[in-house]
Image (tube, grey):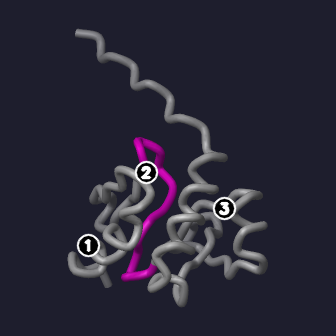
């Protein structure tokens, strides 16, 4: 079951206090980026945040699950989706710990 546009819009809107959050279609689902850093995926209308040590500390006892079969476990965020401030803080601490993406190499002609 693919995620629907209304759910994607809701999640991105809930993170509006974080900075620029964008959703990009990936493999039939969506990847989330905050200020250029990939930090989460939405699969089957569920939010999965990349696991980090500061994120784990912030959440306390996170529920971990793979976003899709064969994926590494991520933090599954369900009940806290309604709490904008909590969600923004989770995104901030997660993104702060993640490295900047590597620059893409230019294609040779």
- As helix, strand or loop, the secondary structure at mark 1 comes to helix
Residue 5 spot, x, y in % from top left: 21, 76
Residue 90 spot, x, y in % from top left: 59, 65
Which of pointers 1 and 2 lies earlier in the amino acid sequence?
A: 1
Q: Is residue 67 left or right of residue 24?
A: right
Alpha-carbon span between mark 3 and mark 1: 23 Å
Residue name at image x 30 percent, y 77 percent: 10
Crowding around mark 2 (Cα neighbors within 10 Å: few <14, some 14 to 19, many 20+) is many
Residue name at image x 32 percent, y 84 percent: 1
Residue name at image x 31 percent, y 59 percent: 23
Residue position marked by numbered label 2 in the rendering: 34
Task: Check contact, mark 3 vs mark 1: CB within 8 A.
Answer: no
Which of pointers 3 and 1 lies earlier in the amino acid sequence?
A: 1
Alpha-carbon span between mark 2 and mark 3: 15 Å
Residue position marked by numbered label 1 in the rendering: 9
- Mark 2 vs mark 3, foreground winner is 2
Q: Quadrant of residue 92?
A: bottom right
Closest to the observer, 56 or 30: 56
* Image position of 45 with respect to 68: above or below: below
Residue name at image x 57 percent, y 50 percent: 95
Crowding around mark 1 (Cα neighbors within 10 Å: few <14, some 14 to 19, many 20+) is few
Q: Is residue 25 left or right of residue 90?
A: left
Alpha-carbon span between mark 1 and mark 2: 14 Å
Residue 28 spot, x, y in % from top left: 29, 67
Mark identifier at residue 51: 3
Examine the residues drawn in magenta and state their main secondary structure.
strand
The magenta segment is 34-46
Closest to the observer, 108 or 51: 51
């Amino acid at each position: 079951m693919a995620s629907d546009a209304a759910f994607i819009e809701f999640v991105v809107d809930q993170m509006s206090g974080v900075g620029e959050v964008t959703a990009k279609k990936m493999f039939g689902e969506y990847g989330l980026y905050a200020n250029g850093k990939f930090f989460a995926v939405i699969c089957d209308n569920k939010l999965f945040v990349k696991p980090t040590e500061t994120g784990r500390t912030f959440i306390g006892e996170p529920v971990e699950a793979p976003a899709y079969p064969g994926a590494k476990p991520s933090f599954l965020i369900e009940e806290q989706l309604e709490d904008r401030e909590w969600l923004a803080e989770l995104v901030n601490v997660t993104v702060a710990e993640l490295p900047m993406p590597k620059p893409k190499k230019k294609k040779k002609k």
